[in-house]
Image (spheres, rainbow, N blue to C red):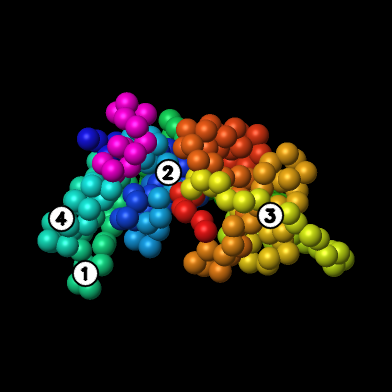
Amino acid sequence: MHYSTYISDLLYRYECVIIPGFGAFLAHRTSAYHDTEKNVFFPPKKRISFNAQLKENDGLLADYVAKAENLSYSEALAKVQVYAYSLETRILNGETILLDKIGSLSKNETSQIKFEPVTVTNYLTDSFGLASFQTTPVTREVLKQEVEALEEKAPIHITTARRINTWLRYAAVGLLAIGLSGTLSFLHFKDIADYNFAQEQVAKKQVENTIQHATFTIDNPLPAVTLNAFKPKGSYHLVAGAFRVEENAESRVKELREAGYKARAIGENRFGLHQVVYGSYTDRTEALNDLRKIRTSDNPNAWMLIQEID
């Protein structure tokens, strides 16, 4: 069973791959950067990290294993759970586990799981075909020595008139250089300011789109709304979002119902967020089919929660 291969495949397409009961591998996008010491330029990439707190099954890995090994979902989930138990046991016994193309897992001094990612694999598909490259620094001192050698071989005799004309030329060139340097400096700092402003806008947009902290901007208080609660059906729930403000969760439920979904709020999770689902299912296959449709047409961040709800 090549679980490291399965996890690696999923990291190309998803930002989070959870091993139920063990932890999650997270992929964070990083910008291109320049190593000034080695004079090497690196392309944008996904930086892989590990979070041992994210253990709740989201169905992603088990569903992938079921398709890859032609198993039922229950059989695949059972095998994944055995794999998670094996990883934890081996690490607690002091063994270092190498996951191909991902990194190594081991135990630190406080018996916590330590993760060291590999640096050769780039999971960012936008950077496909891009590689790091090294540049050669400009050796100005060598050029200066070559010019001095040429001057020694061919000395120039300067008369008084030539000296005056030469200084006038130098003065004109100096004034032109000062003017150009001022203009280029202004354009350079303007480009930097424009770039920083654009990056700030991108960062603000990313923060606004973060699901766990998403809120609706409401200029006027909403009137009281009475929602008809659906009775829970099944243990497979397609989550549309989680909100800190309960009124925002109710507004989201109303929007989804107007769009034709059997949406409802299923209460608070352990982080104190009010969860809203598109609907609940008793059949896992039907839930997965609807999840794929929702991710394509409405919300690419929708996910499946497997949980019995009273």
Q: Nearer the viewer, residue 291 or 163?
A: 291
- The residue lying at 75 percent from left, 48 percent from top is 255
Q: Nearer the viewer, residue 291 or 184?
A: 291
Give the label on residue 85, or none.
Answer: none
Q: Quadrant of residue 204?
A: bottom right
With 239 as the anchor, is 62 left or right in this view?
left
Highlighted range, magenta: 67-80
Q: Percent from the top left, x then y, of residue 153?
A: 39, 42
Query: Which mark's residue is nearer the viewer, 4 or 3?
Result: 3
Give the label on residue 229, or none.
Answer: 3
Amino acid identity at mark 4 = Arg
Residue 142 among magenta residues: no
The residue under label 2 is 59
Mark 2–mark 1 distance (CA, rounded to whole Å): 28 Å
Mark 4–mark 3 distance (CA, rounded to whole Å): 47 Å
Query: Which mark's residue is nearer the viewer, 2 or 1?
Result: 2
Q: Percent from the top left, x then y, of residue 38?
A: 34, 52
Mark 1–mark 3 distance (CA, rounded to whole Å): 46 Å
Residue 5 in view (yes/no): yes
Badge 4 marks a residue whose secondary structure is helix
- The residue lying at 81 percent from left, 61 percent from top is 225
- The residue lying at 68 percent from left, 65 percent from top is 246
Q: First in sequence: mark 2 or mark 1?
A: 2
The residue under label 1 is 111
Above or below, 284 against 91 in this view is above
Neighbours of disc 4 within 10 Å: few (<14), some (14-19), many (20+)? some
Badge 3 marks a residue whose secondary structure is loop
